[in-house]
Image (cartoon, rainbow, N blue to C red):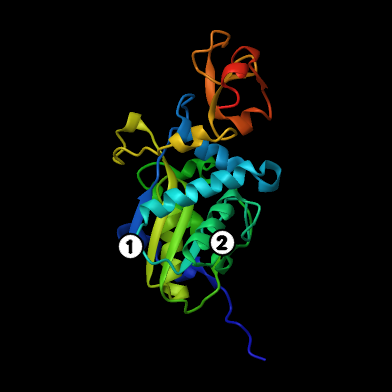
Amino acid sequence: MIRPPAPIPLRTAIDADLICRRQPCDEAHILGSFWPHSRTSFESRVVKGFKECVPTRDFEPHISALGDFYAQRVLEKTAGRRIDWVVRVLGSTETRPDPQRPLALTANALCRLTGARDAAHLLFKTESRPPMRFVGRLSGPEALKARVRYVLQDLFIRPGSLGGTALLIDDIANTGASMRVYAQALKSCAGIERVVAVNLAATRFARGRDGRGMLALDTAELDSHPQLRRVFVDCSGVFHFVEVCPAINAPAAVEMRFLAERGATPCAQCAGRFGTR
């Protein structure tokens, strides 16, 4: 009986300094912006809300519709590229690819739409850990290198000779460390020839003077979907269908309707006029 090759610990297989100096992704795209402290940025709330819908079975069918929306936006960015494999970055608490993660829905949709195969099973971690944003030592001028090492510490890959092009997807980018590690791992250990990386959004700061330029996701399509459209949740726990509703109790924060309905009640004054749009 031939045993499969042993998984490779990436902390010993990848040179952190090298991938900080040289980008291993052949293409890197970002769909939009995530403004962490904004109450009014709908695209920020969409990507954060998408990320938080775990397990996805508790948010169906709306989360699948949102996963399909993101898949279409990814395809627009990668139009004309041949995609052989789809790989998603594991969430901070995942040790193995969990099919109940929102990004798994987008990966499935991308496989369905392109004919590519899902290769997320190649990568796994030995333990879950807190998200990088909660680890103070990962900030400052050496942030990229520190975050690369943080990703590498307990990540493994099953070696192979896949060939072709991999579409690598992740939700919110900070320094881009995860994408660099995964791209290099796919090339060095799985035989992938080309990596096209797409983040759903990038964390923005310094009022946009952070070197990323203009990144804006067009969410107009979501406003035509009754449950994905934007609503406005005010400080009294009521959600409104229009921001100018005279009954709104300011301040209000933008939200997707299907998430607002889980903890807020609809405004009686504007629901009759706008609630079915």
- Give x and y (percent) for residue 105: 58, 53
**Is 11 located above or below residue 55 in the figure?**
below
In this view of the protein, which residue sits in the foreground, 52 or 157? Answer: 52
Location of residue 122 (image quadrant):
bottom right
The answer for how far apart the CA atoms under marks 1 and 2 are is: 25 Å
Read off the residue under disc 1: 26
Q: Which residue is mark 2?
A: 154
Disc 1 residue type (three-letter): Asp
Q: Is residue 207 above or below residue 4?
A: above
Residue pictured at 59% horizontal, 15% vertical: 270
Left or right, 73 with respect to 88, comes to left
Quadrant occupied by the C terminus? top right
Q: Which element is circle 2 on?
A: loop
| Quarter of the rendering occupied by the N terminus | bottom right
Rendered residue at 64%/14% (across/down): 236
Amino acid marked by disc 2: Asp
Q: Earlier in the sequence, mark 1 or mark 2?
A: 1
